[in-house]
Amino acid sequence: MSLSQSRRPLYEVKANLFKGLAHPVRIRLLELLSDTEELTVSALQAEIELEASHLSQHLSVLRRHHLVISERRGSHVFYRLADPRIRELLAVARALLLTLLSQDTDLLSAAQGLPEIRGADG
């Protein structure tokens, strides 16, 4: 018997949140939704350029992990972030990534500046 969401350890619940983020298309969808109040599925599809069935699967994962909320109005389905802090999470992740990439570049530049290692015969 599995534990309910409220009885599972926080680190497990947190890992599931990150599973919802664990695809580039889903990150891009969240970034698009971060830039505006809400978007229709057709607007998201135009931006992502993904088949409707694939887009629907990604949106379903985001809903299941409580990252987005959907609302049907007439013949359109609108999506928005489930919590404004998701926008902050994406911003922090981007800042961290940029820092890590700059450190890697610094390390690479430093390593390229090291003297050559002579081979056993040299």
Image (tube, rainbow, N blue to C red):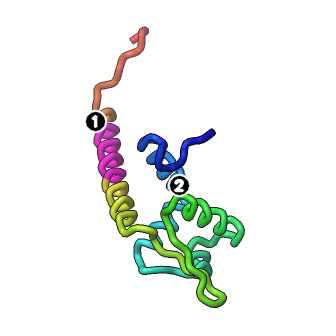
Instruction: Please determine whether, in this image, residue 17 is positioned above or below residue 52.
Output: above
Judged left or right of residue 71, residue 113 is left
**Front in this rendered view, residue 112 or 8:** 8
Q: Residue 44 got which mark? A: none
**Front in this rendered view, residue 81 or 55:** 81
- Kindly indicate the quadrant of the structure image that contains residue 45: bottom right
Residue appearing at x 35%, y 20% in the figure: 117
Check if mark 2's residue and mark 1's residue have beta carbons within 8 Å.
no
- Kindly indicate the quadrant of the structure image that contains residue 57: bottom right
Part of the protein shown in magenta: 96-109
The C terminus sits in image quarter: top left
Element class at badge 1: helix
Q: Amino acid at mark 1?
A: Ala
Q: Residue 20 got which mark? A: 2
Judged left or right of residue 103, residue 23 is right
Element class at badge 2: helix
Instruction: Answer few, some or many: residues within 10 Å of disc 1's Cα (few below 14, many 20 plus, some between 14 and 19).
Output: few
Instruction: Please determine whether, in this image, residue 79 is positioned above or below residue 117.
Output: below
Residue appearing at x 34%, y 42% in the figure: 104
Q: Amino acid at mark 2?
A: Gly
The residue labelled by disc 1 is: 110
Judged left or right of residue 109, residue 51 is right
Instruction: Please determine whether, in this image, residue 21 is positioned above or below residue 12.
Output: below
Question: Which residue is outermost to the top?
Answer: 121
How far, Cα to Cα, is label 2 from label 1?
36 Å
Q: Is residue 65 magenta?
A: no
Residue appearing at x 30%, y 43% in the figure: 103
Instruction: Please determine whether, in this image, residue 101 is positioned above or below residue 77.
Output: above
Judged left or right of residue 70, residue 34 is left
Residue appearing at x 42%, y 80% in the figure: 37
Q: Please report whichever mark, 2 or 1, sits nearer to the chain's N-terminal start.
A: 2
Instruction: Answer few, some or many: residues within 10 Å of disc 2's Cα (few below 14, many 20 plus, some between 14 and 19).
Output: many
